[in-house]
């Protein structure tokens, strides 16, 4: 049922205390009754820097009184914990990046080993730096027919735990960047049999578990901690994320300290209110909205299968709302198609040589999806060329040779050398091509000729070389030894 307030069309504020606080603040501003003598410095004026600050209220002194806001925040977080079946929850205004790093700080102590997926997001690798943990890498299987990774299997995790009995935990990422999923329940059992927690970077999975045709979310599958981005799959403000945990194997006080250690003391109330609103929306209408989302993605996949030589990633082991479009058989290049889509005002989440990945969410409808497919298919037809075999990105196949821990490498003396001269030396920097944003080189790993060649190939194809001190790849940063 909808309500008459256009700022809250679905009547969520009664179940969303932070949203309610934001709505009260905006109403005071609208009525001219707000004369704040606290930050932020723009004081809601739009005649200084324009409308860019509209709606920006802090948590403290904006959504509630400075001395009471934490009570309101905790109320909202308790509601989220209940919805996901957790007994600990915090809202982050720094994205899943912050959540991954907080969980890394919460799970072990400096010098301990941890079992970690090698197709991790860079934020988790830097979490290992902060926590001083030593990664024991586990790799997914790669499907040669698509060039894309599956999940890290249960036998792989069990073998790593047997070989490293002092590991303090297991940290996996599911769904993967391309939407592949595995047996999280089995991996949870493997971790628990070894007496350690399972942590999951579920950044793309805030909607999972809210419809019978969707996989369960990580906590429901047995994980002990998960981080998820409210701004990716849900209609929340950019940077909004949730960190959720069960505290049987994780210490609640340690979780709190880890979260606060790297979170801002001036959280944006607008972001927090949007997380609260997205949670209330899931609680109220999650099954219906997720059902519509499933229908939209199924419709898109059906239409794309009718385009000659175009494929979609689908079936068992794939999160059903993820749309990964396989174009190698058409001969068209994803980077070229992406340029057409951007020119049409339809930017996508990811495009590389062989794939295009749009993100369809609860906010889409049949018209928006159809309009996108019209432009996409026209672009594919315009750029058809000789079919090719899908390539396999180095991000999915890298076999790292760890020479020193990420933390030791981060603090070690380093120097700049030519890229060819860097081969055989130890990397001082993290280099991750986008897409998919998974490191090919990480601090403390041996630089190989294959890694340098693959990075150069991605750059030549039009990919972005992220986080490198020299994105041209003419030089690399190496450890002085």
Image: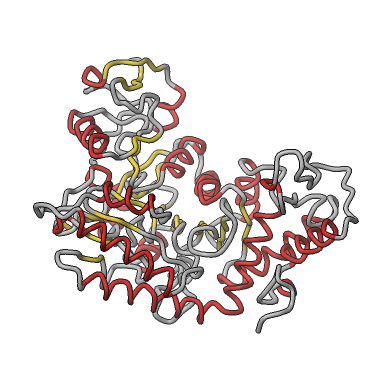
Would you say residue 406 is visible in this rendering? yes
Q: Is residue 49 left or right of 314 when viewed as pictured? A: right
Residue 322 spot, x, y in % from top left: 36, 65
Residue 83 spot, x, y in % from top left: 59, 72
| Count of number-bearing discs | 0
In the picture as drawn, the residue positioned furthest to the bottom comes out as 1
Q: Nearer the viewer, residue 352 or 60?
A: 352
Q: What residue sits 78% from the left and 59% below the top? A: 26
Which quarter of the figure is the N terminus placed in?
A: bottom right
Q: What residue sits 63% from the left and 57% below the top? A: 90
Q: Is residue 25 left or right of 352 when viewed as pictured? A: right
Q: Nearer the viewer, residue 401 or 462?
A: 462
Residue 197 spot, x, y in % from top left: 46, 57
Q: Can you say whether 9 is above or below 270 in the image?
A: below
Q: Is residue 135 left or right of 382 when viewed as pictured? A: right
Residue 289 spot, x, y in % from top left: 50, 77
Q: Can you say whether 57 is above or below 273 in the image?
A: above
Which quarter of the figure is the C terminus placed in?
A: top left
Q: Quadrant of residue 310 in the image?
A: bottom left
What colour scheme has been applied to the protein in the rendered image?
secondary structure
Q: Can you say whether 125 is above or below 291 in the image?
A: above
Q: Quadrant of residue 463 in the image?
A: top left
Q: Quadrant of residue 196 in the image?
A: bottom left
Q: What residue sits 46% from the left and 38% below the top? A: 126
Would you say residue 197 is visible in this rendering? no
Q: What residue sits 17% from the left and 49% below the top? A: 391
């Amino acid at each position: 049922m909808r309500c008459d307030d256009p700022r809250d069309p679905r009547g969520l504020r009664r179940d969303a205390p932070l949203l309610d606080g934001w709505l009260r603040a905006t109403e005071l501003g609208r009525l001219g009754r707000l004369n704040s003598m606290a930050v932020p410095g723009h004081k809601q004026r739009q005649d200084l820097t324009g409308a860019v600050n509209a709606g920006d209220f802090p948590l403290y002194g904006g959504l509630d009184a400075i001395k009471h806001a934490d009570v309101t925040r905790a109320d909202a977080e308790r509601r989220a914990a209940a919805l996901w079946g957790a007994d600990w929850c915090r809202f982050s205004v720094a994205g899943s990046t912050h959540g991954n790093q907080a969980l890394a700080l919460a799970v072990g102590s400096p010098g301990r080993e941890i079992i970690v997926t090698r197709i991790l997001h860079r934020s988790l690798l830097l979490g290992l730096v902060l926590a001083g943990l030593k990664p024991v890498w586990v790799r997914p299987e790669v499907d040669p027919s698509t060039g894309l990774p599956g999940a890290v299997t249960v036998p792989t995790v069990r073998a790593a735990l047997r070989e490293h009995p002092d590991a303090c935990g297991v940290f996996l990422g599911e769904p993967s960047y391309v939407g592949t999923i595995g047996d999280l329940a089995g991996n949870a059992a493997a971790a628990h049999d070894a007496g350690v927690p399972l942590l999951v970077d579920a950044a793309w999975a805030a909607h999972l578990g809210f419809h019978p045709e969707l996989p369960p979310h990580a906590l429901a599958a047995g994980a002990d901690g998960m981080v998820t981005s409210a701004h990716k799959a849900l209609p929340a403000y950019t940077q909004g994320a949730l960190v959720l945990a069960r505290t049987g194997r994780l210490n609640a006080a340690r979780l709190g300290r880890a979260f606060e250690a790297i979170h801002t003391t001036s959280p944006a109330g607008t972001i927090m209110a949007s997380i609260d609103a997205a949670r209330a929306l899931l609680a109220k209408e999650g099954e219906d909205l997720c059902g519509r989302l499933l229908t939209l993605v199924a419709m898109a996949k059906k239409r794309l299968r009718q385009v000659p030589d175009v494929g979609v990633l689908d079936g068992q082991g794939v999160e059903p709302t993820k749309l990964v479009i396989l174009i190698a058989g058409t001969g068209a290049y994803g980077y070229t198609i992406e340029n057409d889509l951007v020119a049409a005002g339809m930017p996508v989440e990811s495009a590389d040589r062989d794939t295009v990945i749009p993100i369809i969410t609860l906010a889409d409808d049949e018209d928006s999806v159809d309009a996108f497919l019209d432009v996409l298919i026209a672009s594919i037809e315009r750029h058809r060329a000789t079919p090719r075999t899908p390539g396999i990105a180095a991000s999915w196949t890298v076999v790292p040779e760890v020479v020193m821990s990420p933390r030791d490498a981060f603090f070690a003396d380093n120097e700049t050398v030519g890229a060819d001269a860097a081969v055989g030396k130890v990397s001082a920097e993290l280099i991750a091509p986008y897409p998919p944003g998974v490191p090919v080189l990480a601090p403390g790993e041996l630089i190989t000729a294959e890694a340098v060649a693959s990075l150069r190939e991605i750059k030549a194809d039009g990919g972005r070389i992220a986080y490198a001190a020299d994105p041209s790849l003419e030089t690399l940063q190496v450890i002085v030894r």
